[in-house]
Image: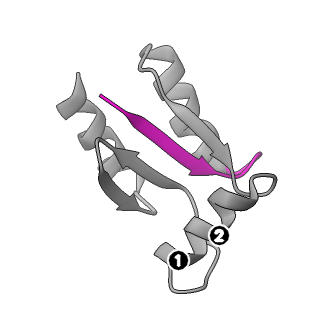
Amino acid sequence: MRVILYGKKGHAHTVAFKNYLRMSEIPFIYKDISVDAEAKDHTKELYGGMLKFPTLFVDGEVYLIPTSDEFNKIMKELI
C-alpha cells in the first residue's frame, strides 16, 4: 500500500489526516505544497491551475480535496 498526502502546514484537514495516519501507523509520504515545488506544480495540474489541498493518493487512486467523511471511508477500506 502506498499513501501520499499533499497538504499545507497548519491547514486543519491536512493536520487531521496526518494525525490519523500516524496514530493508525499507516505508512505515508507527506508533501507540503508550500515548500515542495514539485508537489505544488502537480497540485496545480490536478486542479486546473488552482492550488487546492489536501490531496490524497492511495495506490494510484487520486482523491481531490477529500472531506473528513470521505477520508474516513478510504481509511476503513485500507485497514
Residues marked 2 and 1 touching at CB (< 8 Å): yes
Quick one: quadrant of the C terminus? top left
Residue pictured at 71% horizontal, 57% vertical: 33
- Image height check: is 27 above or below 42? above
> Does the stretch in magenta take in 72?
no
- The quarter holding residue 58 reads top left
Vertical side of 77 occupied by 58: above or below = below
Residue numbers of the magenta segment: 1-11
Q: Nearer the viewer, residue 32 or 14?
A: 32
Q: Single out the residue that lies furthest toward the front.
A: 38
**Amino acid identity at mark 1:** Glu
Provide the secondary structure element on which disc 1 rests: helix
**Rendered residue at 57%/27% (across/down):** 19
Residue 15 sits in which quadrant?
A: top right
User: Toward which corner of the image does residue 40 lie, by quadrant?
Assistant: bottom right
Q: Nearer the viewer, residue 55 or 15?
A: 55
State the mark number for residue 45: 1
The residue labelled by disc 2 is 41
Counting from the top left corner in percent of width and height, residue 61 is at 28, 53
